[in-house]
Image (tube, grey):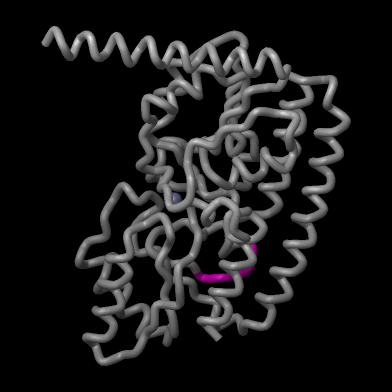
Amino acid sequence: MKESGLKYIVIFLFALSVLSCKNDTAAKSGKLNVVTTTSMITDLVKNVGGDMIELQGLMGAGVDPHLYKASAGDVTKLTGADIIFYNGLHLEGKLVEVFEKMHSATKEQVALGERLDKKTLIGSDYFASNYDPHVWFNIQYFKQFVTAVVNTLSEKDPNNSANYSANGEAYIQKLDALEKEIKGIIETLPKEKRILVTAHDAFNYFGKSYDFNVVGLQGLSTATEAGVQDVQRLSQFIIDNNVKAIFIESSVPRRTIEALEAAVKAKDHEVIIGGSLYSDALGNAGTVEGTYIGMFTYNVNTIVNSLK
Ligand code: ZN
């Protein structure tokens, strides 16, 4: 008992010293300390803030935000942050309580998804927010995230506001080019083949934007496992609609989609696993798929090539 008590004190003192180092660095460099949750938001903030800010993203490649819990290191990062950007709409289901405990006059917490026009969002009974939180798959919403990040950084750091605006505009132009490119690729896929079957319902906004019928094996969150009935129902749907390919996701265990593949084959029909899509996390940092734009292009090429 005594020893473990001592251990906690040591850990606490260590965290405190790390924290004060971090604040010293920020104070010396004069840069804002910014913490982000998902890798999509981290990439966006990096594009706007560049080396004018100190940026720390909590969730890396393959990390599922629905199930993510803050580590002791994360709490240290969050405590030392001037600004926290997160998706909200209950995507980061287990992190919100940590945020709520951290009310501070100097800290800005921005739930980017919650600033969108709620009337245009896709509803959901599952989430406490009552909305489907996977809003980044609508590029127009992601552009609104950019504007919100530019405004928040400019308010907190007015000296660099012209640079934040210029970076934001340049990034929005890239997102416009992305939207155009993607529409061109999707147009090559006939409408009747636009059926996207994935592990969980992350792609509803994607489907709404590009006219896909989207069917997830699990519900909107990975916190609920798909049951035998779901697998049977969906395997029949695949057969009835002659769907050629189904998809795994980088942040969801592949066993659910493999069970679906097996169920279709057991009924003497052919279906392939068309590849792995990035849904709730980007690819590895430093790769093309480690950026939002690279992820989107990769997903669309994978989907269209497999369903053709
Ligand atoms: Zn999700």
**How far from the left and from the top, in percent, is residue 60?**
48, 45
Does the image show residue 10? yes
Residue 52, given in percent of the width and then of the height, sits at 75, 30
Q: Is residue 77 left or right of residue 71?
A: right
Taking depth in this image into account, of 109 and 57 the one nearest to the observer is 57
Compared across the picture, whether 5 is left or right of 110 comes to left
Q: Is residue 303 above or below residue 101?
A: below
- Residue at coordinates 67% horizontally, 43% vertically from top-left? 44
Q: Looking at the image, which residue is at 24% across and 14% down?
A: 7
Q: Residue furthest left?
A: 1
Q: Which residues are magenta?
A: 209-213
Q: Judge whether residue 295 can be spotted in this image.
A: no
Query: Does the magenta portion include 53?
Result: no
Residue sitting at x 33%, y 65%: 254
Q: Quadrant of residue 237?
A: bottom left
Rendering coords of residue 151 (x, y %): 76, 29
Residue at left 73%, top 75%? Answer: 184
* Residue 255 position in % (x across, y down): 27, 66
Whether 253 is drawn above or below 90: the answer is below
The N terminus sits in image quarter = top left
**Screen quadrant of the C terminus:** bottom right
Position of residue 203 relative to residue 281, above or below, is below
Quadrant assignment, res 238: bottom left
Q: Nearer the viewer, residue 55 or 174?
A: 55
- For the image, the number of numbered tags is 0
Q: Is residue 25 left or right of residue 78?
A: right
The reply, left or right, for residue 41 in relation to residue 200 is right
